[in-house]
Image (cartoon, rainbow, N blue to C red):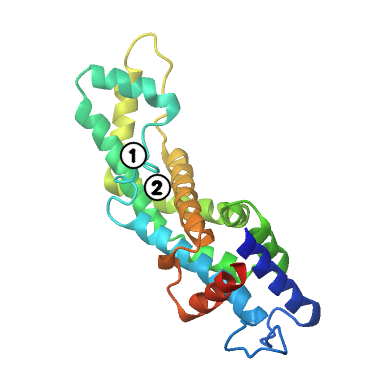
Amino acid sequence: MKRAFLLLSLLLMGFTITSFDNDKPLSANAGPQIIPSNLEIGNALKQALQQGTAKSTDQLSAVNGFFGNAAVKILFPPEAKKVEKTLRGMGLNKLCDDVILSLNRAAEDAARDAKPIFIDAIKKMTLQDVTGILMGQKDAATQYFQRTTTAQLAAKFKPVIQASLNKTGATKYYGTAAGEYNKLPFVKHANPDISDYATQKTIDGLFIEIAQEELKIRQNLPDTRATPLLQKVFAFADKKGN
């Protein structure tokens, strides 16, 4: 938190006399080689967030990015848990397993399209956004992305998810599973359409992963300082924070 206050103070000092794109050093008594400019500080935060979102989307869009990650793995919808339990009780374990695998493969397909949406949101950050993230809760950046990208992600993901559900067989498998269940007497029929659920769970998974990366950035872990700019800005913050 001390580092966040320092970075915020430096940002505000710069904004009182310059625009966000001004690259003048914040102090006349020290060279820019030592003290980062307000532009460098703002860009460092954006760079860190771009790095975190890129890592998250790359991890989740890889094979088993969703399926092999317990924190984001997509299972049967809550309202369909009874469907799964009943079908497994009937010996249809493979059908249920195929549904789960295909849902996660669809999410992995869609996740790769998220990166440019996050990059665009980062580019559009204002001083108010930067301040809110620096001074906010440990998931303030994640909340910012949720506010600014959820609608775009849903619009972008829905057709990709639907196509991927068809490609991976999820539509067929879940439709079959729901159909088998709906044949049973005295049960409330399950909705065989699962695309909306898969789309929302894909978005939820992305934000879970981004929140984890944001926490690493806030902790200033060494592996988050992958560029000279990040090293310069956070090293300066470390020195002033001691």
Locate residue 217 relative to residue 27 in the image: left or right: left
Circle 1: is it few (<14), some (14-19), or many (20+) Cα within 10 Å?
many
Pick the residue in front: 71 or 190. Answer: 71
Residue at 31% in and 48% down: 105
Q: Which residue is mark 1?
A: 171
In the rendered view, tell whether residue 100 sits above or below residue 216.
above
Q: Circle 2 is placed at which residue position?
A: 162
Q: Nearer the viewer, residue 94 or 130?
A: 130
- Residue drawn where x is 58% and y is 76% of the image: 43
Quadrant of residue 4 within the rendered picture: bottom right
Task: Confirm or deny contact between disc 2 and disc 1 (CB under 8 A).
Answer: yes
Could you tell me which quadrant the N terminus lies in? bottom right
Q: Residue furthest top?
A: 186
Q: Position of residue 44 (x, y in %)?
A: 56, 74
Left or right: 27 with respect to 151?
right
The residue lying toward the viewer, choosing from 225 and 152, is 225
Instruction: Kindly identify the residue that appears in the image at 75 percent across and 72 percent down.
Output: 12
Label drawn at residue 213 = none
Compare residues 51 and 146 and report the one nearer the observer: 51
Quadrant in which the C terminus is drawn: bottom right
Identify residue type, mark 1: Thr
Quadrant in the rendering for residue 75: top left
Across and down, in percent, residue 192 comes to 39, 31
Q: Quadrant of residue 100?
A: top left
Secondary structure under tag 1 reads helix
Badge 2 density bin: few <14, some 14–19, many ≥20, Cα 10 Å: many
Name the secondary structure under disc 2.
helix
Q: Report how far apart the C-alphas of labels 2 and 1 lie in the structure.
A: 8 Å
Q: Is residue 154 left or right of residue 20?
A: left
Amino acid type, label 2: Gln
Counting residues from the start of the chain, the first of labels 2 and 1 encountered is: 2
- Whole-percent x and y of residue 148? 62, 57
